[in-house]
Amino acid sequence: MKGEARGQLYSLQATAAYWLRDDRATQRYADLALSCLVKGSTEYYHAVAHFLVSSGRVKDWESVERTLSTVVAAETLPGAIAARALCLARVGYMFMMQGRPAQMKQIAEHLDQISRDVPVTESLSLAQVHHFRSGYAMSTGDLCGGIYHLEQTVASFERAGDHRNALMERNTLACNYVEVGDFQRAETIARLNL
């Protein structure tokens, strides 16, 4: 089997392991995929996102740092900008969940540089970028920015037809409106999920 096809199969195994919450297997299969895939390609960014998130979950920070520096330095191939943004957003969210604000800031800066180039047709990538930006804004005390990006997250998930994530993030958005005292807006948003 040729390298690229082998890499795609390993990446598929990494995806399955990720959804089974087996971080060590995800890390292993994603690493195998990365050895076969072309750096900067869409497939590369999907696999490396799995590798980085699973490595962070098992606290393998050396692998995260080494691999993330490779990702940031890699030239994005044509048509892969949305995959790169999605990758960075997922990694940034993992850093947030692991309580690593300095790394979150690094991801936010990289996303600021590239996210405007993500086509509006790439709704899932944009949803993840806004989701990370919302969490990052909230973590830095910017509640209004967090709400704005969470509204964009919900809208992007809806455009993509991802009803599950739209419902979950709409509930989070309603909670954020409660936090700022806009109970009527929170109730209106929550009722959309009924």
Image (cartoon, grey):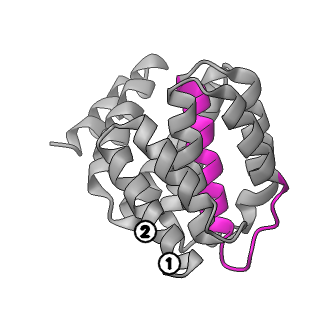
Instruction: Give the number of callouts.
Output: 2
At a point 61% along the width and 68% down the height, the residue shown is 36
Is residue 42 visible to the viewer in this orientation of the structure?
yes
- Pointer 2 local density, CA inside 10 Å: few below 14, some 14–19, many at least 20: some
Which secondary structure, mark 1? Answer: helix
In percent of width and height, residue 121 lies at: 54, 74
Image marks 1 and 2: residues in contact by CB distance under 8 Å: yes
At a point 23% along the width and 45% down the height, the residue shown is 192
**In the current view of this chain or complex, which residue is farthest to the front?**
1
Q: In terms of depth relative to the viewer, which is nearer, 43 or 105?
A: 43
Q: CA distance from mark 1 to mark 2?
A: 6 Å
Span shown in magenta: 73-97
In percent of width and height, residue 72 lies at: 80, 51
Pointer 1 residue: 5
Q: Main secondary structure of the magenta part?
A: helix
Q: In terms of depth relative to the viewer, which is nearer, 70 or 25?
A: 25
Q: In terms of depth relative to the viewer, which is nearer, 95 or 26?
A: 26
Pointer 2 residue: 9
Residue 156 part of the magenta segment? no
In percent of width and height, residue 186 lies at: 34, 30
Residue type at mark 2 is Leu
Quarter of the figure with residue 65 = top right
